Amino acid sequence: MDRTADRDLKARALKVIPNGMYGHEAVHALPATFPQFFERAEGAYIWDADGNRYLDFMCAYGPSLLGYRDQRVDAAAAAQAAKGDTMTGPSPVMVDLAEALVSMVTHADWAMFCKNGTDATSMAMVAARAQTGKRIVLLAKGAYHGAAPWCTPNPVGVVAEDRAMLRYYEYNNAESLEAAVRDAGEDLAAIFATPFKHDAFFDQALPDPVYARRARELCDETGAMLVVDDVRAGFRLARDCSWSLVGVQPDLSCWGKAVANGQPLSILLGSDRCRKGAGSIYVTGSYWFAAVPMAASLETLRIIRESDYLEQMIRMGDRLRAGLASAAQRHGFGLRQTGPSQMPIMLFDDDPDLRVGFAWAEEMLQRGVYIHPWHNMFIAACMTEADIDMAVAAADGAFAATRARMAELQPSPVILAMAAAKAAEELQALA
Amino acid sequence: MDRTADRDLKARALKVIPNGMYGHEAVHALPATFPQFFERAEGAYIWDADGNRYLDFMCAYGPSLLGYRDQRVDAAAAAQAAKGDTMTGPSPVMVDLAEALVSMVTHADWAMFCKNGTDATSMAMVAARAQTGKRIVLLAKGAYHGAAPWCTPNPVGVVAEDRAMLRYYEYNNAESLEAAVRDAGEDLAAIFATPFKHDAFFDQALPDPVYARRARELCDETGAMLVVDDVRAGFRLARDCSWSLVGVQPDLSCWGKAVANGQPLSILLGSDRCRKGAGSIYVTGSYWFAAVPMAASLETLRIIRESDYLEQMIRMGDRLRAGLASAAQRHGFGLRQTGPSQMPIMLFDDDPDLRVGFAWAEEMLQRGVYIHPWHNMFIAACMTEADIDMAVAAADGAFAATRARMAELQPSPVILAMAAAKAAEELQALA
């Protein structure tokens, strides 16, 4: 595969962007062969700057739900763009969209729109404090809720005060949650939870209904707000808030990524239990009321309601999981595939420094399939059996090639440095 | 003017959005006749949900620099949209755009892209702390830097710790700044400044060069980072960072609004003095690397470099200012027009509760001109002499109508409540 254009772009970027790239789409912690820049995307595929095509199991880290450049969503966006986008006030489509969300998401009585997932989680925190008049927020250890000072997983440049009112509990552990609630005493504003455990570098875990129900009860007992951060998983597990699958309704839920099929929009949904708090805070952004992403979201929601996009994603996810399991077994690899099949993560047994995972991801990339060695992936609804079968065939070759390289594999220096930093942080926490 | 559609939309919105609307585009603190929802926008004009047309001096609170739906920018956006927008990595256009910014903005050696103005100011704060290893950030009292917990002007739902490492000084007052720097001692990370004083509700003030130069010197002496928050004013005062006009180069500058003529994009620019800090923090967002807003920005920057857009805005701003001054005088009103003419604010003498300003804004709206009674406004480069002359003619009628209503004017209950809340807050600060 030619990588000249990407290499040249990386060299230019290094001069005018710190480290050449930043954030979740930076490839520094991926195998060196991974391209950084992409020229175009269509359906389930992306093309890098050198014109190499990949079946993309990252889906832009979630936003591509129906596939890139879905014609129905793009037509709705274009029709709105011909009228207006960022104006001196919102378009009527904002009201249509809020009504659509309230009608679809069981716990929701109201909606507020923003741009980043972090905007929605931050607004949930502030609204919960405004509603309750209390300060402490409980988070599951290791859960990702965004990249603001209070939640970024790399706390460089963050001051201790940014997290002074946060406390941590173990996901899926009702006793740990109860202890944290007890410690918060009379000052508990909110309990945050991701809909399932989807922490990077770890096996995923579905929510234990005992834990989820206990979170609801503890909020009812204390007056705190229950917040489900559905930014990553929203509308990939259900046509409702993801915890509807375990029968638990939060007071607030945070949405983003898939809600407008790639157009920039995130959302805070809330019940009347938190309407007053949400209405008393001041949050805003230059582009929060832009009409094009809202028109795109309205069409995405229509498709979510009227099509079998969800069942199709699950079918394709199951097909991929079964195919990879067979191929891994055939080649003698222990491959752990965890979480919902439509949001899979794949980690190798006996691979603490990810050297096997990295080699396999490299070999998949070389065969035209873009997978991630340590972050959960995403199935798009436009993926077909032929796409999945192509990926499984590529995996067969990639397992064989990885097996042949096993003796020579080295860990990624970036991953080793991340592990060392993490260990140092944990030591510091103990001290 | 028919307002039926807007009234119906407001009633529907009240059910599914807290208070029916929130943030800087909410019309709760504007005269009751102001429409909330807009159907479309083109050039210098917006149309509300009832089809009423207004010459728009808010320009979407800044994003409309060249005019709404500028064909050149929209063509660049559409061409990129036909290739890809939010993908699994950035497009090569990200590198082109970073290079263009670094070539245009004197102090900039690198660029980072984000979505909200608040993202850029928050990143500046975190990067400055990472670079310096220090914590205290100085802000001018009353300056707006966004709506995150550390900076939102309405601190409901905010905890004291969110602002524990902030200190305040008087804008344009070198002595006050020096005292704040002294108080910060060895722990000063950054000094923030807006390029000129553009606080809502107040007369604007251009930067005193003595103050601006002193800010630079103090940063040089202490090792702190100088941050110019150009989100609102960027590219409306200069084709460079706005403080280039007073000969002062910051270490970091924050951009947004006008940079992509309405497409969602904000930017942190920095010098090599802060490259290491910026490269060590973790900040990201689901849509930060989307290609369409970057393509729109690249074309906007080309027009900024190659056209007389800036001189045109100043000519139109000056023409408006002169016309309004004559008309106000003719009708016996003391109208204070302050700040750069292309970012004007208009406040009436002897109008502490804004009842005169509200009445005049109502009368302007009735005559097809959208102005704001207490926030700075924006001239768009597409405005023509005919547009400005229409606004001045409207102002003549609006002054006359306001004069006729003077005896019956009442203050807005929302403004009275805001003033009372502000006074209570100041009392609390004294206690």
Image: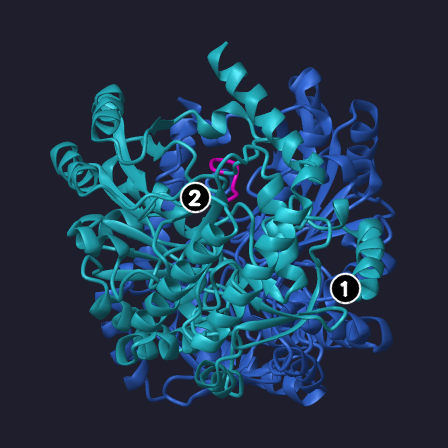
Chain colours: A cyan, B blue
Instruction: Find disc 2 in the rendering and name its residue.
Output: A145
Image coordinates for residue B165, horizontal then vertical, percent: 55, 26
Q: Which mark is residue A130?
A: none
Residue occupying image coordinates x 43% and y 57%: A326
Q: Verify whether residue A149 appears in magenta.
A: yes
> Quarter-wise, where is residue B411 in the image?
bottom left
In front of the other: B11 or B199:
B11
Q: Quadrant of the C terminus of chain B?
A: top left
Residue occupying image coordinates x 65% and y 20%: B184
| Amino acid at dot 2 | His
Q: Is residue B283 visible?
A: no
Image coordinates for residue B45, horizontal then vertical, percent: 56, 84
Same subunit, labels 2 and 1: the answer reads: no
Residue occupying image coordinates x 62% and y 74%: B84
* Predominant SS of the magenta segment: loop
How far apart in space, not on screen, are marks 2 and 1 (Cα)? 29 Å
Q: Is residue B364 above or below residue A167?
A: below
| Amino acid at dot 1 | Leu
Q: Chain of mark 2?
A: A
Instruction: Find disc 1 in the rendering and name its residue.
Output: B97
> Quarter-wise, where is residue B430 in the image?
top left
In front of the other: B208 or B231:
B231
Q: Verify whether residue A57 appears in magenta.
A: no
Classify 10 Å Cα crowding around label 2: few (below 14), some (14-19), many (20 and above): many
Does B174 sit left or right of B328 as displayed? right
Tell us which disc is closer to us: 2 or 1: 2
In front of the other: B382 or A376:
A376
Count of residue discs: 2
Residue occupying image coordinates x 54% and y 32%: A352
User: Which residues fall within the magenta stretch?
Assistant: A147-151
